[in-house]
Image (cartoon, helix red, strand yellow):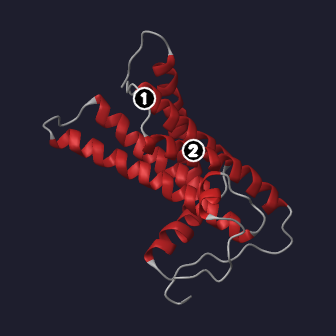
Amino acid sequence: MQTLGLSDSTPRTEGRLKSLFWPTIATDNDVDYVTRQGFWICIVVATFTLVLSLLVVASGSLWTEFTAIALLQVVFFFLCGVGIRVISRVAAVAAFSAYLISCISSGRRGFGVLTIIILAMLLANIRATFLAVKLVASRTEPPPAPLSATWSQRFSDVMPRKLWPSGKYAFYAVAVVESALWLSELLPGSRVR
């Protein structure tokens, strides 16, 4: 069963719903689970944004302001996911803030169920990264080695650890541009997107 990935060798300390929306961070396994969850949420948001921007381009608009901003957000959410995977509190707060502001400024009358679920999971990741930093600081043993048996493990475990040392500078640069766009959207009378 463990070879097929049908059961975990180390059980989680809580149920699936609680771990999604209000995780407890008590072990290295919990840190790994929560940061992997945050990584994949950001990857899903980045992929969805990329698909939407490609649909805009495919509809006949070769290059618009929306497409440029959407591509910037794809990079931003990808780097947020990488940052969350390596326990960056700034990346977790930035991902939640960016998604919330983009939902508010999109002009939709209300938030859909999927939007609320994604916001709740991104908010839970903020809490989880703050708790994970405390746990990692009190750790007496070295962290577990990243898994690299499958493609998804290499993508979610190995790549973020290799990319973040230099990629964090790109993240901060993109976050500054993204923050300027947030401010321009929140100011009355200005409409970028």
Q: Is residue 116 above or below residue 177?
A: below
Picture quadrant of residue 38: bottom right
Left or right side of 96 for 32 = right
Kindly identify the residue that appears in the image at 58 percent across and 78 percent down: 147
Kindly identify the residue that appears in the image at 48 percent across and 68 percent down: 155
Left or right side of 67 for 160 = right
Work out which residue is located at the far top of the displayed protein and give it.
Answer: 189
Query: Percent x, y for residue 139?
Result: 84, 67
Q: Is residue 125 above or below residue 32?
A: above
Q: Total label count?
A: 2
The answer to whether residue 140 shows anywhere in this view is: yes
Residue 23, label in figure: none
Local SS, label 2: helix
Picture quadrant of residue 140: bottom right
Q: Would you name the residue on which mark 1 appears?
A: 110
Left or right side of 155 for 92 = right
Query: Percent x, y for residue 65?
Result: 30, 29
Kindly identify the residue that appears in the image at 53 percent across and 90 percent down: 3
Local SS, label 1: loop
Kindly identify the residue that appears in the image at 42 percent across and 9 percent down: 189
Q: Would you name the residue on which mark 2 appears?
A: 120
Camera-side residue of 182 and 174: 182
Q: Please name the amino acid that badge 1 sits on.
A: Gly
Q: Please name the amino acid that badge 2 sits on.
A: Ala
The answer to whether residue 166 shows anywhere in this view is: no
Q: Residues within 10 Å of mark 2 (few under 14, many from 20)?
A: some
Q: Are marks 1 and 2 in contact (CB under 8 Å)?
A: no
| Nearer-N-terminus badge (1/2) | 1
Q: Is residue 141 above or below residue 107?
A: below
Quadrant position of the N terminus in the picture: bottom right
Quadrant position of the C terminus in the picture: top left
